Image (cartoon, rainbow, N blue to C red):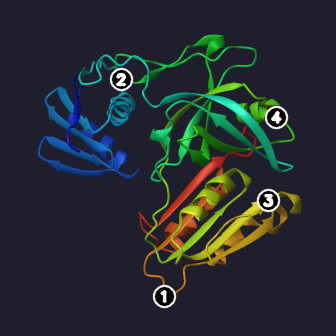
Amino acid sequence: MSHLLTARADITVNEPSAMLKRLCEHIAEHGAIYSRMESRHDLRFPFGTALLHENANHVRVEVAGGTFPALFDLRSIIAGHMQEFAAQPLTIHWTGDGARMTRPPNYRMLRVVETQDLTPRMRRICFASDDLSLFAGLDNIHVRLVFAPDGQGLAEPRISPDGLESWPDGPDKPEFRRYTIRDIDVAAGVLDIDFVLHAEATGPGSRFAETARAGDRIGMIGPGGGSLPLDRDWYLLAGDETALPAIARFLELLPDAARGHVIIEIANEAERQPLAHRRNMKVDWILRTDGFVPALQCHAPPEDAQSPFIWVGCEDSAFRELRRYVRNDLALKKGYHSIVAYWREGHAAD
């Protein structure tokens, strides 16, 4: 980075030492590198740094990033976690670069260009927007989509003094869901996102996708959510329809020499779709009635795999069972697996 953008905040907080330790350890569980030297806590992210200095009842925060979106993300991460872990109301006011930002720099308005049904339950929507370069990286391929309440216009976010994005309350409050960017063309200003259609479209994403027409608008914030390490010698990628867009994108990103197994759970045979994949990545489609968790438990890393990686996106109860299996039975450490709950039985999935 030739020039770093920096921002600072001085925050009054009770007993900051124990709180900062818990906060930083929590953030480190999600990929940051954490180190501590006496009263100084250092967090290093791929896109910048955060230094937190403590004294008796005070924390000074200094964040630095190479772009305004990176700086905004850093401010949001620290401010949001401070509010969560402090267990007291906090006053956070940022100074320095970006102090005059009024709209999150990682927000885009999306406009529907066209729709395409890939299967009876999977619809691809092509969106157009301005300046999509921020979303073209391969390190973070997920976004939050912003849906207006039924019958309401979509309000744009603002930045509150604490550095967090701010949305209207009441009847104008939007709904949010996470999705994967399936494909993107920055030069053309378009991107594709795949939506699962449900028989009872109770979630905002499914409701939107059911009736989406050219010209309809939603919001997008991101990118985030990470990607897949591309330097491993064996992969297991698995999930149901909700995780299929991410798995499909991962398969396209893997190097030619990648080997491993892919397991995709679908409702019925009509939900199969063509997937581009490397020659040594075997793809199996299983039905819901076949048993998702047992199928995965039959595919442990081979003995010659020195650096395996397991990625799973699934329903919450399966997530909990598979996380225990991967951590306890397979004894895979952090950095060798990512098990994600995409939805919960009885709750709107999208």
The structure residue drawn at horizontal position 58% and vertical position 15%, both measured from the top left corner, is 155
Going from N to C along the chain, the mark reached first, 1 or 2, is: 2
Residue drawn at the location 73% of the way across and 37% of the way down? 348
CB-based contact (under 8 Å), mark 4 and mark 2: no
The answer to whether 61 is drawn above or below residue 24 in the figure is above
One can see residue 350 in this view: no
Of mark 3 and mark 4, the one earlier in the sequence is 4
Residue found at x 78% / y 60%: 273
Measured along the vertical axis of the image, is residue 285 above or below residue 206? Answer: below
Between residues 157 and 31, which one lies in front from this camera angle?
157
Give the image quarter of residue 203: top right
Is residue 297 among the parts visible in the rendering?
A: yes
CB contact under 8 Å: marks 1 and 2: no
The residue labelled by disc 3 is: 266
Which is nearer the eye, 176 or 57?
176
Marked residue nearer the N-terminal end (2 or 3): 2
Q: Name the residue under label 2.
A: 163
The answer for how far apart the CA atoms under marks 1 and 3 are is: 31 Å
What amino acid is found at the position of numbered circle 3 in the picture?
Ile
Q: In this view, does 97 lie above or below 229?
A: above
**Other-residue count near label 1 (Cα within 10 Å), few / some / many at <14 / 14–19 / ≥20:** few
Q: Nearer the viewer, mark 4 or mark 2?
A: 4
Label pair 3/4, CB-CB below 8 angstroms: no
- Return the mark for residue 304: 1
Q: Do the residues labelled 1 and 3 touch (CB within 8 Å)?
A: no
12 sits left or right of 329 in the view = left
C-alpha distance separating marks 2 and 3: 41 Å
